[in-house]
Image (cartoon, rainbow, N blue to C red):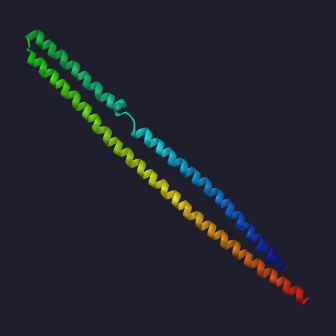
Amino acid sequence: MIGSAISAAMGIGGAIFGGISASKAMKKVKSNLENQKLENENWYNRRYNEDATQRADAQRILNKTEESIRNRNKQAAGAQAVMGGTEESMAATKEANNQALAEATSQIAVNAEARKDSIEQQYQAKDAQLDDALNNMEINKAQAISSAVQGVASAAGGLGTGLDDYIETRNKA
């Protein structure tokens, strides 16, 4: 009889301790998830706002285009010196060079937009994943609180029954 009361009291203590421990663990998980969300947002801001023309792939395209323009200019100047080219031929070469540079710049812009779309999709997917994890954690927290309350109530009921039995036994004696 007293044993059941002690057991019930220990059950209450265990339920309370378990609830406190679960709450501490969930706070830590929540903090970790919130840090991951912040890191994800920082990654997004850094990558999304990068200057596309400063990336290595864009610099490579620009350098190849500039090299091609220099080579065409040399060829045009050589042809004009040897064959006595006209102003029209030099103008055509300059137009071709301008077109090549415009195409290279356009390609960099297209690549930059596609890259930004990809970064945004990655960010949104990761953000949704972290939001789901936070929501699941809150659901689990609510369930843990409910279980702890039920455990305390059950243990308290056992304590009451154990004390009632003890008192009844004492009164008969």
> Measuring 18% from the left and 20% from the top, which residue is drawn there?
72
- In depth, the one of 83 and 43 nearer the eye is 43
**Up/down of 11 relative to 50, above or below:** below
Q: Position of residue 73 (x, y in %)?
A: 19, 17
Q: How many marks?
A: 0
**Up/down of 152 relative to 112, above or below:** below
Look at the image and tell me in which quarter the C terminus lies. bottom right
**Up/down of 96 relative to 48, above or below:** above
From the viewer's perspective, is 71 left or right of 52?
Answer: left
Q: Position of residue 91 (x, y in %)?
A: 12, 20
> Measuring 23% from the left and 18% from the top, which residue is drawn there?
70
Write down the quadrant of residue 172 in the picture. Answer: bottom right
> Measuring 16% from the left and 25% from the top, which residue is drawn there?
96
Q: Position of residue 102 (x, y in %)?
A: 22, 30
From the viewer's perspective, is 148 left or right of 100?
Answer: right
> Measuring 68% from the left and 72% from the top, which residue is drawn there?
151
Look at the image and tell me in which quarter the N terminus lies. bottom right
Q: Position of residue 149 (x, y in %)?
A: 66, 71
The extreme right residue here reads 173
**Up/down of 145 relative to 133, above or below:** below
